Amino acid sequence: MFKRYIEDIRTVFARDPAARHVLEILTTYPGVHAVMFHRLSHQCWNLGLKWLARFISALARWFTGIEIHPGAKIGRRLFIDHGMGVVIGETAKIGDDCTLYHGVTLGGTSWDGGKRHPTLGNGVVVGAGAKILGPIEIGNNARIGSNSVVVKSVEEANTVVGIPAHVVGSVEYKRANGDFDAYGHQPSADDPVAMAIHGLCQQLQALDKYNRDLVAKLGEAGFDTSELSPPPIKTDCIELAPVEKPAIENI
């Protein structure tokens, strides 16, 4: 047990640059306190002391603002940063080296018994305010963007954002090399919706150029093109790369 406490303290130093010394972590970090409370309540739960486990869990919620059901299974080196409003359901499972920010919910979508809360793999980062709902699986090293609502399983090393959440990147999580994406945010993520709109803008510009070239050639061939000149296309696209011919087959 003492070894776990040492791991928790080292984890805070590794993931929170604001941490200055051990006493500060032990006395002012509610995420650390919540995990310590949970270890005790989880042991009571496994021993069949259900009421006592729930009472300890309630005390932890009053003191930390973090609600972890004593039946939840939590791996090693979990870091709950800030923590206020975090809710972890009874059948939730969290792997090793995960990070949760404030307002995160690992919740259920059914009133039936059995597995109804999500399972997080190792190294998962869940941004502030994100909701992961139902008995879904979040793969190792996945990242959940802030305020996302995740209702489908996420594959390993993927980044998801939005409501409902969708994949915006598939890059290796590089925390082991010293990089850490706070709040599960990937600044260079390629949002598929933005990419689709950008692609449509490219198609419009390409078709416009193609039509103007065609009208010009008809004029050079002696045809009257006074009524064929296409109007200019007004778009909000920014700095689109020029396209010589329309890639209609890609629409």
Image (cartoon, helix red, strand yellow):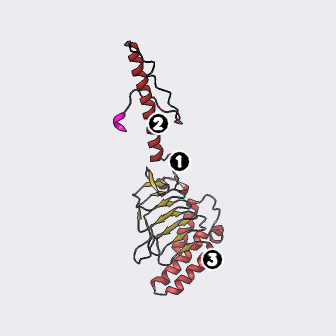
Q: Residues within 10 Å of mark 2 (few under 14, many from 20)?
A: some
- Per the rendered image, the range of residues in magenta is 237-251
Q: Amino acid at mark 2?
A: Cys
The residue to which callout 3 is attached is: 62
Please tell me which residue is depicted at 56% across the width and 73% down the height of the picture.
Answer: 67
In this rendered view, identify the residue nearer to me: 103 or 125. 103
**Precedes in sequence: disc 3 or disc 1:** 3
Mark 3 secondary-structure assignment: helix
**Precedes in sequence: disc 2 or disc 3:** 3
Q: Is residue 13 above or below residue 26?
A: above
Q: Amino acid at mark 3?
A: Trp
Does the magenta segment cover residue 2? no
Q: Quadrant of residue 183?
A: bottom right
The residue to which callout 2 is attached is: 201
Mark 1 secondary-structure assignment: loop
**Precedes in sequence: disc 1 or disc 2:** 1
